[in-house]
């Protein structure tokens, strides 16, 4: 498990963008530590890397959400 700051450094996605993606439903809300901090795992990092790469390729958030929905249903 890692913090939002660690996730941001590893993926190159700003902290506020990670929070935005959570609010938009692109990233599942992570569990919280006893101190109420977000605790991200490897699945969150992989999903965020997919979203970042998709954005880099020019996909809009609606299309990315549709792709993630397909992957989640499989």
Image: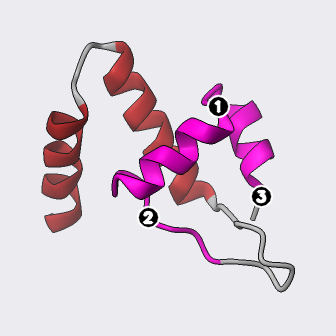
Mark in front: 1 vs 3 = 1
Task: Residue 50 in the image: state x and y as whole percent.
Answer: 40, 36
Q: CA distance from mark 1 to mark 3?
A: 15 Å
Task: Specify the segment rendered in magenta.
Answer: 3-31
Say which residue label 3 marks.
2
**Does the magenta portion include 10?**
yes
Is residue 12 shown left or right of residue 43? right
Task: Residue 9 in the image: state x and y as whole percent.
Answer: 76, 32
Mark 1 or mark 3, which has the lower sequence index?
Answer: 3
Say which residue label 2 marks.
28
Is residue 49 shown left or right of residue 37? left
Task: Residue 24 in the image: state x and y as whole percent.
Answer: 35, 52
Q: Nearer the viewer, residue 59 or 41?
A: 59
The answer to which quarter of the image holds residue 39 is bottom right
Res 14 label: 1
- Quadrant of the drawing holding the N terminus: bottom right
Residue 51 vertical placement versus 53 (above, below): below
Is residue 21 shown left or right of residue 58? right
Q: Residue at x 30, y 13 (%)?
A: 57
Mark 1 or mark 2, which has the lower sequence index?
Answer: 1
**Does the magenta portion include 23?**
yes
Mark in front: 1 vs 2 = 1
- Mark 1 secondary-structure assignment: loop
Q: Residue at x 17, y 56 (%)?
A: 69
Mark 2 or mark 3, which has the lower sequence index?
Answer: 3
Is residue 57 shown left or right of residue 69? right
Q: Residue at x 78, y 56 (%)?
A: 3
Q: Are marks 1 and 2 in contact (CB under 8 Å)?
A: no
């Amino acid at each position: 498990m890692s913090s939002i700051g660690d996730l941001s450094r590893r993926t190159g996605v700003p902290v506020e963008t990670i929070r935005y993606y959570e609010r938009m439903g692109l990233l599942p809300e992570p569990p919280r530590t006893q101190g109420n901090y977000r605790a991200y795992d490897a699945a969150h990092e992989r999903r965020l890397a997919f979203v970042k790469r998709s954005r880099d390729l020019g996909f809009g958030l609606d299309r990315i959400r549709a792709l993630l929905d397909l992957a989640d249903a499989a």
